[in-house]
Amino acid sequence: SAVISQKPSRDICQRGTSLTIQCQVDSQVTMMFWYRQQPGQSLTLIATANQGSEATYESGFVIDKFPISRPNLTFSTLTVSNMSPEDSSIYLCSVLLAGIYNEQFFGPGTRLTVL
Amino acid sequence: SQQGEEDPQALSIQEGENATMNCSYKTSINNLQWYRQNSGRGLVHLILIRSNEREKHSGRLRVTLDTSKKSSSLLITASRAADTASYFCATDPGDSSYKLIFGSGTRLLVRP
């Protein structure tokens, strides 16, 4: 398995500001993903974070709103830009470990509230 | 978009009883996975069943998969109060993207 940390664990932000969420893994991973979980809902994939290249976004999510970086194999950031109350959600990163291509391991999540 | 639908949306049982949750999906899959989430935090992987498997066990968990009906079920036997959580199925479409498509989830409450 892997130990995955996310920072911050929670935050309360003002409308119009941006927040960057960090995801750090203690093992080398092959793939990293970012999910959003709106209140009372299931998880929706935002994008696949690709090392050294632009992230691959799912339908309905765009780079200007959710820029993602992945400078190395064990670290990624997701920025929620120009936030509105509709962005209030839990944001989770997940990883696939090298050699284990079926089971995704999830971080503890970042609970974001936008006022 | 979400592929899976789960039922029931919510389930309340007494400790010691069995809990059954069902998941349906729409497209072909490589595998189907079940996750647990406590209090809106991170997800814990419970069990994975491959598309060529029909049943799998892990401790008090039993998962079945019917690819002809595009459905799966998760059975938790002899439930405990600590099993109270939300349970999600997730499908791997097998397109080498490795991304997961999550179902809508079942909120399970086990009353002591």
Image (cartoon, helix red, strand yellow):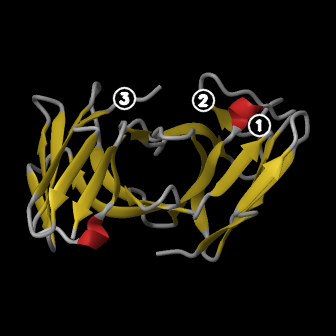
Pointer 3 chain: B
Mark 2 Cα shell of 10 Å, populated few (<14), some (14-19), many (≥20): few
What x and y, as percent, mark residue A113? 73, 46
Q: Nearer the viewer, mark 1 or mark 2?
A: 1
The amino acid beneath tag 1 is Phe
Point out which mark residue A58 bears: 2
The residue at the point 47 percent across, 38 percent down is A41
Q: CA distance from mark 1 to mark 2?
A: 11 Å
- Whether discs 3 and 1 lie on one chain: the answer is no
The residue under label 2 is which amino acid type?
Glu
Q: Is residue B12 above or below residue B104?
A: below
Residues behind callouts 3 and 2 on a single chain = no
- Between residue B111 and residue A52, name the one nearer to us: B111
Q: Residue at x 17, y 42 (%)?
A: B72
State left or right for residue B25 relative to residue A18: left
Gap in angstroms between the C-alphas marked 3 and 2: 14 Å
Kindly identify which residue carries mark 3: B3
What's the residue at 87%, 41% (across, down)?
Answer: A14
Expressed as whole percent of the image width and height from the top left, the position of residue A29 reads: 59, 65
Q: The numbered mark 1 sits on a residue in which chain?
A: A
Please give the label number shown on residue A66.
1
Residue B46 % position (x, y): 30, 63
Label 1 element class = loop
Q: How far from the left and from the top, in percent, is residue B92?
A: 36, 42
Marks 3 and 1, how far apart in space?
23 Å
| Relative horizontal placement of residue A2, taking residue A28 as reference (left or right) | left
Frontmost residue, A83 versus A115 = A115
